[in-house]
Structures are given as C-alpha cells and as structure tokens.
Amino acid sequence: MADRIGLVIGNENDGRARIIIDRKGACGGCHTTGSGCRSCLSSAKMESLVLNPVGARSGDVVQVSLKSGNLLVGAALLYVMPVLALLGGALIGSAESSVVGWDGTSATVLGGGAGLAIGFGLVMGLDRCSWVRRRLAPRITAVLVSETASSAPAPNSCCG
C-alpha cells in the first residue's frame, strides 16, 4: 500500500478532495546544502483528485493511500487493454481479409486501428464509470494536521 502526504486545496461536491502532493521520485531526500539538487529547485508538485471519506477540508495536511492491487489494475486497464484490443483487431482483420476480399496486410492494419480505437474507447468509458473510479482511486485515510484545529506548521516536503 502506498501512503503519501498531501495538502487539501479544495473539495468537490461528489465527495472528492483536490490535493497537492510531492511527485514521487522527484527528490531522493538528500537534503543537500548549498545550491541544492535540481529536482528540489523545480516544481515537483502534482495536483490530484482523491476520495475524501474522512471529511478533510481545505488547508488540512492529509495521508493519502492507494492499494498496490488498485495501482496494478489501473495500470493494466490504461496500458494493456488498448494493446490487447489492437492485437485482437489485427488478428480479426487478418482472418477476415479473405471474406471481405481485401489484401491481408491492409485488412490487418485496418483491423488493428479499429481495435485500438475500441480499446481507447473502453478505457475512456471505464474512466467515466463511477463504480470503477471509487474502486481504484486513492483515498484520504487520515487528517494529520487540521487547519481549523491548530496553527502548527505543516510537515515539510522531502526538499524542505
């Protein structure tokens, strides 16, 4: 399970929160002195929409979690599904080329293009499905520092 620290910058009406987190891998936590590392000097922030079951408000520092299995399923949907659809379309195009009376290569290319378009359409459709979004989206698991409860300084990023 991947846990990250983020800052809530806004709330949506659908129970999600807009947060800012440090980009993973942008800083190795070296805390160099002097000129600093290049990633610390650049904008290494990422804005994201996450589920907000704990009711975090704007200004709260929160812990955000994403199950490893959800990350793998999301990556498979995004990357593997269009490739499989492309290959399936190419195979169907090649097999049906004699039925249609086309050249095998042309039918394979057209079938592959159609399969790729269908694969991207499926990914876009699944992305718009609220059930899939709720299952795969990262979620806020805890409010670490509440803006309203205390005036304690927020934890620094790895580059602080």
Image (cartoon, rainbow, N blue to C red):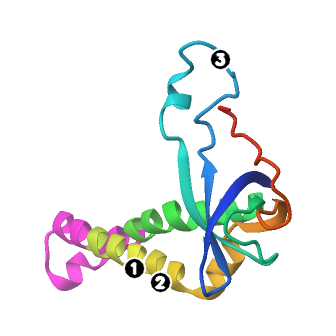
> Can you give x and y, in whole percent of width and height, for residue 130 in the image?
60, 87
Q: Marks 3 and 2, how far apart in space?
A: 45 Å
Q: Quadrant of the image for the N terminus?
A: bottom right
- Residue highlighted by disc 1: 121
- Measured in 3D between alpha carbons, the distance from the residue under mark 1 to the one under mark 3, in whole angstroms, is 46 Å
Quadrant of residue 85 within the rendered picture: bottom left
Query: Pointer 3: what residue?
Result: 32
Please give the residue where the numbered disc 2 appears in the rendered image: 125
Type of secondary structure dominating the magenta stretch = helix
Element marked by disc 1: helix
Q: Secondary structure at mark 3?
A: loop
| Callouts 1 and 3 close, C-beta under 8 Å | no
On residue 42, the disc is none
Q: Position of residue 17 (x, y in %)?
A: 64, 73
* Residue at (67% x, 57% y) in the render: 7
Location of residue 41 with respect to 74 vertically, above or below: above
Q: Amino acid at mark 2?
A: Gly
Residue 117 placement (x, y as % from top left): 32, 74
